[in-house]
Amino acid sequence: MNKPELSRRRFLAQVALAVPAGAVLLDAVVTNQASAQAAAQAAAQAAAQAAPAKLPRLEESDPSAKALGYVDNIAKVDRKSPQAARFAPGQECDKCSQLQGKVGDAYRPCAIFPGKLVAAKGWCSVWVKMA
């Protein structure tokens, strides 16, 4: 039998080729994952802005809405509730930085309540002034 011998010189030459090739492959995988994540985020944002009419409206009876004191009309804020401790007149959802979608729509997506539409004239305890 004839066994090919692996000399030190040949081994080092193969390793010298394999390391950069591995680095290139790893970089391609990482770049592809980052591109896929960016594309998924862009698609989700576009879907939220393109089709808000297909999303259901957030009901005040929803557990997450109750927990955050959400009301679809700012006039209905229960000022005695613990959630309303931060309430101030003029804090409608359409003046909150969490609200997304097209300005002027009566119901729009909100970052706090994903997959639901909130009333632009509503309020919740997570209200944050627009910058």
Image (spheres, rainbow, N blue to C red):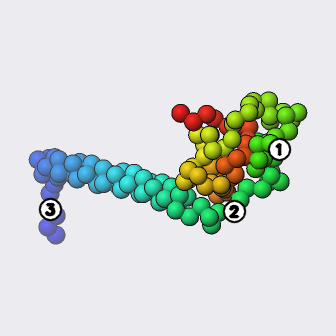
Q: Could you say where residue 53 lies in the image, as x and y percent from the top left?
A: 62, 64
The quadrant the N terminus occupies is bottom left
Amino acid carrying mark 2 in the image: Pro
Dot placed on the residue nearer the N-terminal end, 2 or 1: 2
Work out whether residue 121 or residue 37 is closer to the camera in this orientation and state it: 121
Q: Is residue 7 visible?
A: no
Amino acid carrying mark 1 in the image: Lys
Q: Which mark is residue 117?
A: none
Q: Which residue is mark 2?
A: 56
Dot placed on the residue nearer the N-terminal end, 2 or 3: 3
Q: Could you say where residue 130 lies in the image, as x and y percent from the top left?
A: 57, 36
Q: Could you say where residue 62 lies in the image, as x and y percent from the top left?
A: 79, 54
Q: For the residue labelled by badge 2, is the local secondary structure a helix, a strand or a loop?
A: loop
Q: Residue furthest right?
A: 80
Q: Residue at x 17, y 51 (%)?
A: 17
Q: Residue furthest bottom?
A: 1
Q: Is residue 122 left or right of residue 129?
A: right
Q: Is residue 37 left or right of residue 96?
A: left
Circle 2 Cα neighbour tier, 10 Å, few/some/many (<14 / 14–19 / ≥20): few
Amino acid carrying mark 3 in the image: Pro
Q: Which residue is mark 1?
A: 76
Q: Could you say where residue 11 lies in the image, as x and y percent from the top left?
A: 17, 50
Q: Residue at x 78, y 56 (%)?
A: 59
Q: CA distance from mark 2 to mark 1?
A: 21 Å
Q: Residue at x 16, y 64 (%)?
A: 3
Residue 3 vertical position relative to residue 79 in the rendered view, above or below:
below
**Callout 2 touching callout 3 (CB < 8 Å):** no
Q: CA distance from mark 2 to mark 3?
A: 70 Å
Q: For the residue labelled by badge 1, is the local secondary structure a helix, a strand or a loop?
A: helix
Q: Residue at x 63, y 44 (%)?
A: 94
Q: Which residue is mark 3?
A: 4
Circle 1 Cα neighbour tier, 10 Å, few/some/many (<14 / 14–19 / ≥20): few
